[in-house]
Image: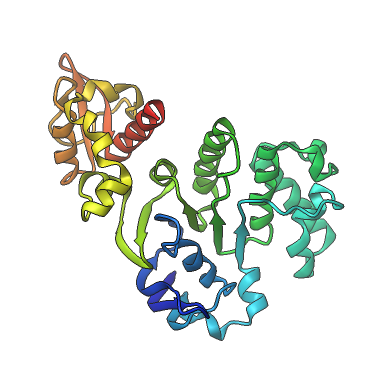
Amino acid sequence: MIRFEHVSKTFDDKTKVVDSLELEIRKGEFFVLIGPSGCGKTTTMKMINRLIETTEGSIFIDGKNIRDYNIHELRWDIGYVLQQIALFPHMTIAENIAVVPEMRKWSKAKIQKRVDELLEMVGLDPDTYRGRMPDELSGGQKQRVGVVRALAANPKIVLMDEPFSALDPLSREQLQRDLVDLQKKIQKTIVFVTHDMQEALALGDRICIMKDGKAVQIDTPEVILQNPANTFVEEFIGKPRLSWYDHRKVEDIVSILAQEGKQGEGNPLSTEAPLQDALLRLEREKEIPIEQNGTYIGTLTSQHIVQYIVEQMKVRG
């Protein structure tokens, strides 16, 4: 879907912020860019829609070099969500959402239908919110409008630049959950920048950890947690702080098991088994049936373990 080939960015002061980056983002994937300040993650994202031009190398979308696209058409096909949602203050919520569809000459009926559809999708009643002004909304509601505005013209790709970092912790967690649910429905290719490892683990299908303009590790949350590429990744994800789960048992994670009722394939693992045994098996198997006192109680996947670890990281601060 999106491919970086030997992409570098050097600014006028000779600072090289992205250094020969090679990566591929798959269609429909939630791809997270994360790393310390100045690592090049936001620059990497902004080069996709040419808000920042590459110095060297090429970026391709669906096999076509982004320099070969008309820049306006390129950006119309890429939704963009910022940390500070810049809603137009003198336009209603419906008018804010309709900006790009109007630029693309959609009919009024089609635009109204799309506005209502999107508001409903993020839990905002259209009759209540379409005529409101931005200053009548809470921070979380503004962020929801910012997200659906980026989706208004049905783009193939959505770029999200630390969209929840300015919110309070409760609003942030709720919007993270909402975004996961929304992505299941819309299946867009999302490139998401964050500095928060908990957020990256909770949201990403794959995570790209960057340092000094380079991709240090690109993997699923499960692989990154189990097999960090080097000491930098270990320290960045807080591996020493996660050592507490080495002594946990499967029973500690029972509350978030998938409860299908029908036992999956493979030998059942007891709730008394160490969680590390489950982690080792999940390197080879997609899911593990779990039993308690000889009775099947659910199926464990690596995603469940990541969810558990993220929840515990939040509890432990």
| Image color mode | rainbow
Q: Which quarter of the figure has residue 167?
A: top right
Locate the N terminus by quadrant.
bottom left
Give the residue displayed 28% in from the left and 45% down from the top.
Answer: 222
Whether 243 is drawn above or below 38: the answer is above
Locate the C terminus by quadrant.
top left
* Residue 178 visible in image: yes
Residue 293 or residue 161, whichever sits in front: 161
Residue 71 drawn at (x, y percent): 63, 79
Q: How many marks?
A: 0
Whether 159 is drawn above or below 228: the answer is below
**Residue 227 left/right relative to 308:** left
Whether 1 is drawn above or below 270: the answer is below
* Residue 31 visible in image: no
Give the residue displayed 38% in from the left and 44% down from the top.
Answer: 201
Give the residue displayed 57% in from the left and 44% down from the top.
Answer: 164
Whether 313 is drawn above or below 46: the answer is above
Give the residue displayed 37% in from the left and 27% down from the top.
Answer: 316
Residue 237 drawn at (x, y percent): 32, 45
Residue 162 drawn at (x, y percent): 54, 51
Residue 149 drawn at (x, y percent): 69, 54
Q: Residue furthest top?
A: 293
Q: Residue furthest bottom?
A: 68
**Residue 156 left/right relative to 104:** left
Residue 203 or residue 231, whichever sits in front: 231
